[in-house]
Each structure stands twice: as C-alpha cells, then as structure tokens.
Image (cartoon, grey):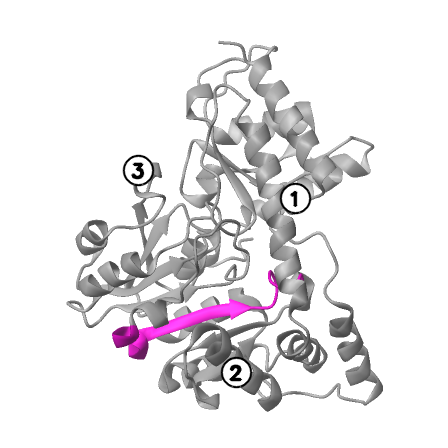
C-alpha cells in the first residue's frame, strides 16, 4: 500500500542528516569515525541562555504562545535588525518560527501557486529545492561555479527569470561554499530585479556572524533598500549562538507577507516553544561576546583546514569567506580506482568510500547541486580537523594517478 502522495514521494530525506546517521551507526559499532557532515557548532550556547530557559520553566511560562512569537522576542529581533543591520522594522513586520527551515516552508506554502518558479543559485543548501517542490513550486537551479565565486551574476539571473518566476533564493554567507555577496554584487542583482516586479527575494542570512576573513557582511535588504517591500530576511539563533536544537528562527519582511506566515504557523505548529523563545531572547539581548569568540574559533579552524588541504594533490579548494564549511573539489579524482578496483565515478561514490574505508564523513556535492565536490564541516575540534585532512589525504593517495 502506498502512503505518500506524488509530492512527498518526489523529494528525498535530508542528505546531510542521512550521512550523519550512517556515520553514527558505524561509530556505534566501534568504528573510529570523524563526522564532519552536519553544520552544527560543537560547543554549548552561552550559560545565560540555558539559565533563561530554566527561569521560564520555574516561573510557569510553559503555555501556548502567540503564532508570531512573544512580543518580547519580536521586539528583540526588531532591535537586532536596527542595531546590527541598520534596518528598521516594526513588530508586525517580524515573526518567530521553529527554526529558519520552517520559515521557508511557511513562505512557500503561503505564496506559491502550482508551477510558480523559484530561482536557486547552486551550490545551495540541500533542502531549498525540496521545500519548494513539496509546496507545489518548481525549483530553477542556476549553476554558479568557481569562476563567479560560487555566486549568481546579473546575467545569469536575467536569463533565469520567466513570467512564472515568483522568488529568488539568496544565501550569504553561503552553505556550502562560504561565499559572501558584496554590496556592489547585491546592487547589480537589484538592478535586474527592479525590471521584474513580480519577483520576490528571500535572503537567508543564518550565517551572518560566522565571518572568517575581512570580507564584510551586508544584508540584502540594506544593500537594495528599494526592494525592501518584496524582500524576506530569514535568520535565527542556531548558528551564531550554538542553539541548533532549540529550533528558533526569525524573519523580517512586508507586513502582509509576515501575516500570511503567521497564519500558516497558527494552523500547523501553533507557535514556537515559549521556553525556547525565552532562551532566544536572552541570546539576542544578553552579552554578545560569545558571538565574536565563536567566529574567532571558526576562523582559526578554517586556517587549519586551508593549510592542510593545500598539501593534498588532486583536490581543489577555495578557502571560505564565511560559514563553517570546507567545500572541496574532487573532479580531478573521478575515474580513478580504489585498491579494490572500484571506480570513483562520482562524488557520492567518493564520499561513501571515504566514510566506509577511511572513517571520514562528508556530504557529496551533488546534494548541493554541485557534483564533483564534497563538503566538510569545520565545526569540530582542531585535532579532529587535522585527523580529517590526514584521512582525506590517505584516500586521495590511495587512488594513485
């Protein structure tokens, strides 16, 4: 008996989660595994965050919350945008959801008609396209390679827009490449979008504070102020405050769009846990030194990866500007054979062999719409990162010439 409808059957489970589960299964059976598959900080959130959650429980703040989020947290989000991004939003222009991922579900559920197109520059986060398809839209992938810094150009954007285009999906700093759009690059895209008034913009800025070089971050809504009325900013506390499991994201955009997202949320999950919201409130309003310290740690780790990967012949690697991933090109290794005679036909086979034979898990590039790459998270200890590079080098050398 079939239980799934066509839309559900047409999507896949999260590739990064699937690989992480496979790595954990091997580790549970005694294998020595270095798991660099998930994008998750490996340290605890600030102590005052956990204390705020405990205080909320002690005070009995455990009832249903408003669909849009508590007024206190929404005000903190408004203040955050004003303080850090020089953007002014009102309380009715922001909302809180169960992670940034739910915001994407809500927005596409609320706005897409069957056949509407969403332009997604690749490499991109693994879930963008499936979330679009699950909500009746058509993902339109635009390949953006190393020659453009893994970023969409005005020319490629113009060529991808059709009368059916509803949204453009942007992500800076990028998962998986770590690329960051400059103000000038955003404004060039904005000039294209100004000619196509039906196209809305989602700017996924979840890695805003994970900056690894002197390249500055700017919000799309700030760079293209004239498009603010059709831009939705998506952000959250998961990455900046190491709060992945708390599931608190937030968004800012036009009042009518935010109202539609709140309506979707009220009929699905009702609201975000008020305990988690108390923790997020403490994160946004408390001491911010944690954010800078975490970015410094990731910067040091990125240098470890860059220094070690530079010594491995046969791979290509561009150090990331932000986020916490190493996106490693393995195209030159395809077609080589393992010691057992298996041909490395693609990045999926490469990642499988790397995990099963060398004990290192990473996500194949095809999951991000970029075959010929593998993504390794740098959210791990220095020792694990050095060990990971040693294992990657061992596999590369085992393939011979």
Instruction: Say whether residue 11 is left or right of residue 382.
Output: left
Q: Which residue lies at the image location 31% right of the left edge and 70% below the top edge?
A: 113
Residue that mark 3 sits on: 147
Label 3 or label 1, whichever lies nearer to me, is 3
Residue that mark 2 sits on: 79
Please determine whether, in this image, residue 247 is positioned above or below residue 14: below
Residue 86: give x, y in percent of width and height.
42, 77
Using the image as rendered, state which of residue 47 and residue 256 is in the foreground.
47
Disc number for residue 20: 1
Which mark is first along the chain, 2 or 3? 2
What is the CA distance from the residue labelled 2 to the residue labelled 1? 36 Å
Which mark is first along the chain, 1 or 3? 1
Q: Which residues are magenta?
A: 225-243
Q: Callout 3: 10 Å neighbours few (<14), some, many (20+)?
A: few
Q: Secondary structure at mark 2?
A: helix
Instruction: Say whether residue 219 is left or right of residue 319.
Output: left
Residue 260: give x, y in percent of width and height.
41, 82
């Amino acid at each position: 008996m079939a239980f799934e409808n066509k839309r559900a059957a047409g999507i896949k489970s999260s590739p990064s989660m699937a690989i992480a589960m496979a790595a954990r299964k091997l580790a549970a059976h005694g294998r020595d595994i270095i798991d660099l598959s998930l994008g998750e900080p490996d340290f605890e959130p600030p102590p005052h965050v956990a204390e705020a959650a405990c205080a909320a429980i002690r005070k009995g703040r455990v009832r249903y919350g408003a669909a849009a989020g508590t007024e206190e947290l929404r005000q903190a989000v408004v203040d955050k945008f004003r303080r850090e991004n020089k953007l002014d939003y009102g309380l009715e222009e922001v909302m809180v959801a169960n992670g940034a991922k739910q915001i994407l579900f809500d927005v596409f559920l609320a706005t897409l008609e069957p056949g509407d197109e969403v332009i997604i520059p690749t490499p991109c986060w693994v879930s963008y396209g499936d979330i679009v398809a699950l909500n009746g839209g058509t993902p339109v992938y635009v390949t953006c390679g190393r020659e453009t810094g893994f970023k969409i150009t005005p020319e490629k954007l113009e060529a991808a827009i059709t009368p059916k285009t509803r949204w453009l999906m942007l992500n800076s700093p990028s998962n998986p490449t770590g690329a960051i759009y400059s103000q000038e690059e955003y404004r060039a895209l904005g000039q294209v979008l100004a000619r196509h008034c039906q196209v809305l913009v989602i700017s996924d800025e979840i890695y805003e504070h994970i900056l690894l070089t002197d390249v500055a971050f700017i919000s799309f809504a700030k760079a293209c102020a004239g498009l603010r009325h059709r831009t939705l900013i998506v952000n959250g506390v998961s990455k900046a405050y190491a709060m992945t499991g708390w599931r608190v994201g937030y968004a800012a955009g036009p009042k009518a769009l935010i109202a539609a997202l709140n309506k979707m949320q009220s009929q699905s999950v009702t609201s975000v846990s008020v305990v988690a919201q108390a923790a997020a409130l403490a994160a946004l309003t408390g001491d911010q030194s944690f954010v800078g310290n975490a970015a410094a740690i990731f910067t040091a780790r990125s240098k470890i990866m860059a220094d070690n990967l530079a010594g491995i012949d046969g791979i290509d690697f561009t150090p990331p500007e932000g986020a916490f991933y190493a996106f490693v090109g393995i195209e030159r290794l395809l077609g080589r054979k393992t010691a057992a005679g298996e041909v490395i036909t693609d990045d999926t086979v490469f990642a499988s062999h790397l995990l099963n034979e060398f004990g290192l898990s990473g996500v194949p590039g095809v999951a991000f719409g970029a075959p010929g790459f593998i993504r390794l998270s740098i959210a791990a200890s220095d020792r694990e990162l050095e060990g990971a590079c040693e294992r990657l080098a061992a596999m590369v050398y085992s393939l011979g010439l």
